[in-house]
Image: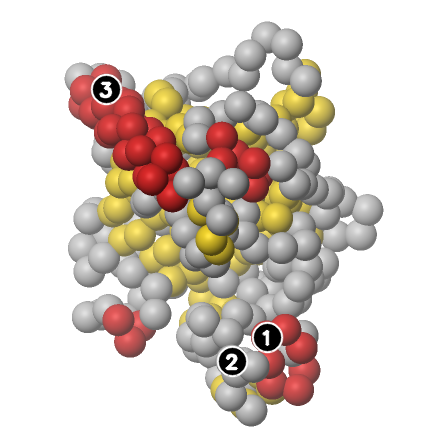
C-alpha cells in the first residue's frame, strides 16, 4: 500500500504541473482570435476503431439513450434520464449540425419499488422530477485508448453538460473529460475536468478525486470545440481546444483506472433548489465522436 504522505506529495506535485498546463493553454487560447476548431491528434501508433459523425441509436447501434443501470439517481431527484435503448427520444435527436442532447421541462412520476435495489435506500416512495435530461452512452466498454468528440455547449442558463467515462460495473472510477456549468448569465460558463477514484493508500475514500480544475476556454458555448482523453496505463491526459489542460501520472491513482469504462455524453441542469433562477431548456450538440486504440 502507498503511504498517505507519499500519495499527498505525488498529488500536490501533479496539481502544480496541471496548473502550469492550464496557464499555458490560457495564453495560447487568448492570443488566438480565430474561432475555428482546433484538432489534437492521437499518437501515430493508434488506430481508429470507431467513428460516429453523428452517434446513431436503437437496436444494433453502438449507442443507447440513458444509462444501463436506470433512469434516476438517488442524489439527483430533480432530473431523470431517457428510457435505455429508446429511439427516438424527446431529449435525444439528430439535427443537421449533429446529435442534440436536450434538457426539457417534462415532469414524470417515479416509484421507489420500480428502481434497482442498490438505489432504493436513498429514495422516497414516490417523487416527480421536473427535468428530462438528454443522455447517451456506449453499449461497449473500453479499456485504454484515445477518446474524442466535437461539442458545442448550450447557451442557456443553469445548464450542466458533460463528456465522461465511467466503470461499467462499479463507481468509481470516473474520468470527467469535461463538465460545464452555466449560471444566471449563460455567458458565465465554467468548464472543468476531474478524475474520480476511491482508494488512497490503505484507506478507502469513496468520493476521492484529483480535484476539479477550471479550464479557461474562450467562448466555449458559441463554437465547436474538440475535447479528448488519452488514457493509458501510465497516464491520463485531457485535451481541450487543441491543448493539454490536465493529466494524472500518480501510480496509486492510475491503478484504479485499470477496468473497462463506457462513454457518456449528457446535458442536464443543476439542482433548482441551489440556484437563484430556474434552468432553461436547451441542447448540447455532439458530432465526430472517435475512438482510437493501439
Compared to residue 191, the image places residue 24 above or below, namely above
Which residue position holds label 2?
Answer: 122
Which residue position holds label 1?
Answer: 119
Q: Nearer the viewer, residue 22 or 289?
A: 22
| Helix, strand or loop at mark 3 | helix
Q: Which x, y percent locates residue 114?
A: 67, 82
How far apart marks 2 and 3 lie (CA) works out to 43 Å
How far apart marks 2 and 1 lie (CA) works out to 6 Å
Question: Mark on residue 40?
Answer: none
Question: Mark on residue 24?
Answer: 3
Q: Nearer the viewer, residue 156 or 69?
A: 69
How far apart marks 1 and 3 lie (CA) works out to 43 Å
Q: Which x, y percent locates residue 207?
A: 43, 57
Q: Residue at x 23, y 57 (%)?
A: 183
Tag 1 and tag 3, C-beta contact below 8 Å: no
Q: How many marks?
A: 3
30 left or right, relative to 182: left
Q: Residue furthest top?
A: 44
Q: Residue at x 60, y 64 (%)?
A: 82
Q: How many neighbours does mark 1 have within 10 angstroms: few (below 14), some (14-19), or many (20 or more)?
A: some
Q: Nearer the viewer, mark 2 or mark 3?
A: 2
Q: Which x, y percent locates residue 272?
A: 31, 72
User: Does residue 94 appear in this view?
Assistant: no
Of mark 1 and mark 3, the one earlier in the sequence is 3
Q: Nearer the viewer, residue 167 or 292?
A: 167
Tag 2 and tag 1, C-beta contact below 8 Å: yes
User: Does residue 72 appear in this view?
Assistant: yes
| Helix, strand or loop at mark 2 | loop
Amino acid at each position: 500500500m502507498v503511504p498517505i504522505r507519499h500519495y499527498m506529495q505525488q498529488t500536490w506535485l501533479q496539481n502544480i504541473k496541471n496548473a502550469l498546463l492550464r496557464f499555458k493553454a490560457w495564453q495560447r487560447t487568448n492570443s488566438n482570435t480565430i474561432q475555428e476548431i482546433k484538432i489534437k491528434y492521437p499518437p501515430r501508433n493508434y488506430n481508429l476503431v470507431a467513428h460516429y459523425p453523428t452517434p446513431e441509436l436503437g437496436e444494433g447501434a453502438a449507442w443507447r439513450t440513458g444509462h444501463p443501470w436506470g433512469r434516476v439517481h438517488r442524489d439527483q431527484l430533480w432530473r431523470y434520464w431517457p428510457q435505455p435503448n429508446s429511439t427516438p427520444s424527446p431529449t435525444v435527436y439528430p439535427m443537421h449540425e449533429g446529435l442534440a442532447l436536450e434538457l426539457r421541462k417534462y415532469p414524470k412520476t417515479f416509484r421507489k419499488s420500480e428502481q434497482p435495489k442498490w438505489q432504493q435506500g436513498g429514495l422516497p416512495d414516490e417523487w416527480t422530477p421536473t427535468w428530462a435530461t438528454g443522455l447517451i452512452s456506449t453499449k461497449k466498454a473500453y479499456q485504454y485508448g484515445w477518446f474524442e468528440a466535437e461539442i458545442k455547449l448550450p447557451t442557456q442558463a443553469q445548464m450542466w453538460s458533460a463528456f465522461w467515462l465511467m466503470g461499467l460495473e462499479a463507481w468509481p472510477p470516473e474520468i470527467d473529460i469535461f463538465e460545464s456549468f452555466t449560471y444566471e448569465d449563460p455567458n458565465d460558463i465554467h468548464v472543468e475536468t476531474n478524475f474520480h477514484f476511491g482508494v488512497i493508500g490503505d484507506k478507502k475514500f469513496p468520493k476521492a478525486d484529483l480535484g476539479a480544475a477550471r479550464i479557461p476556454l474562450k467562448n466555449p458555448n458559441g463554437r465547436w470545440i474538440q475535447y479528448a482523453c488519452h488514457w493509458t496505463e501510465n497516464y491520463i491526459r485531457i485535451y481541450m481546444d487543441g491543448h493539454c489542460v490536465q493529466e494524472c501520472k500518480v501510480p496509486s491513482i492510475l491503478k484504479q483506472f485499470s477496468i473497462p469504462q463506457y462513454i457518456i455524453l449528457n446535458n442536464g441542469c443543476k439542482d433548482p433548489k441551489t440556484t437563484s433562477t430556474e434552468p432553461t431548456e436547451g441542447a448540447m450538440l455532439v458530432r465526430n465522436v472517435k475512438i482510437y486504440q493501439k
